[in-house]
Image (cartoon, rainbow, N blue to C red):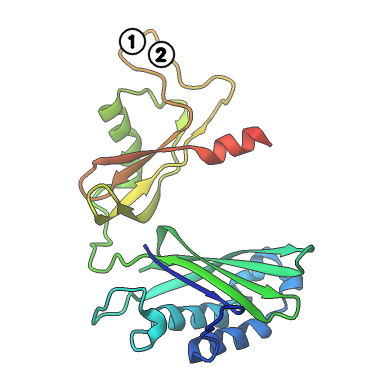
């Protein structure tokens, strides 16, 4: 991931950068307080376009945090949420990065504006999976059998909800096209158990989701299910 941060109060702000100005202008046109969930995409289209132009600029100093390359990353930045903080009187608008219509796992841009929609800060972490084959060699409905085969689990009572992502494999220093599961138990009170006819099967770990390479079928990593844990702690 490549990191970029801009804060209006920095000693040497880049507010004169035309990309920052364009983004700030787009934000002023958005009335955040009245946005409904189903209107976010429409309302933020100009902001998303400005973010794309800003974060993918190859000729301006602001892109010094990204490797110098001839090609464009060609990303999309999709608005996913807005949040109002009454104490600071600011809005936080979050965008996720997509490349060729596929989300980039962990890539996010956070934009902070004041109550007049004046730009205060940008924090971003974006990826560059350019050149990776975007066509999976594994179908979604194969994922359950694949995990059962590799891990020895009986997943009859589990819904996996696999979603396609670009994922940076930090162990092997490479980008992968992967499926990431979002495991849900059909009967939460009676999670996956051994059956009389499948004594070799083991219960699936409750707090694990799987990252599976969509080309090689390899289980890249097992992710702790922090979302589930957070729900239980609330």
- Horizontal and vertical percent for residue 151? 30, 27
- Horizontal and vertical percent for residue 97? 44, 66
- Horizontal and vertical percent for residue 26? 60, 85
Apparent side of residue 8 relative to residue 56 in the rendered image (left or right): right
On screen, 230 above or below 137?
A: above
- Horizontal and vertical percent for residue 113? 66, 75
From the image, which quarter does the N terminus lie in?
A: bottom left
Residue 65 placement: quadrant: bottom left
Contact check, label 2 and label 1, Cβ < 8 Å? yes
Which one is in front, 80 or 11? 11
On screen, 91 above or below 52?
A: above
Apparent side of residue 19 relative to residue 221 in the rendered image (left or right): right
Residue 101, can we see it? no
Distance (Cα) linking label 2 and label 1: 6 Å
Which one is in front, 214 or 21? 21
Residue 38 placement: quadrant: bottom right
Q: Which residue has dot 2 on it?
A: 194
Residue 174, can we see it? yes
Q: Which residue has dot 1 on it?
A: 199
């Amino acid at each position: 991931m490549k990191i970029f941060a801009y804060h209006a109060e920095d000693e040497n702000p880049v507010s004169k950068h035309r990309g920052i100005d364009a983004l700030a202008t787009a934000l002023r046109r958005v009335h955040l307080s009245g946005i409904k969930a189903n209107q976010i995409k429409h309302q933020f289209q100009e902001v998303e376009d400005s973010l794309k132009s800003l974060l993918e600029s190859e000729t301006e100093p602001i892109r010094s945090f990204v490797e110098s390359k001839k090609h464009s990353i060609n990303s999309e930045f999709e608005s996913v949420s807005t949040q109002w903080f009454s104490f600071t009187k600011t809005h936080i608008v979050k965008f996720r990065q997509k490349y060729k219509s596929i989300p980039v796992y962990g890539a996010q841009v956070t934009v902070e504006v004041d109550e007049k929609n004046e730009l205060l800060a940008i924090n971003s972490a974006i990826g560059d999976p350019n050149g990776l084959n975007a066509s999976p060699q594994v179908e979604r409905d194969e994922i359950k059998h694949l995990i059962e085969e590799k891990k020895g689990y009986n997943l009859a009572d589990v819904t996996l909800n696999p979603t396609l992502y670009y994922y940076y494999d930090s162990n092997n220093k490479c980008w992968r096209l992967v499926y990431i599961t979002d495991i849900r138990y059909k009967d939460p009170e009676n999670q996956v158990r051994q059956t009389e006819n499948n004594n070799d099967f083991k219960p699936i770990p409750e707090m694990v989701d799987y990252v599976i390479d969509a080309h090689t079928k390899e289980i890249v990593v097992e992710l702790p299910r922090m979302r589930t844990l957070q729900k239980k702690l609330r």
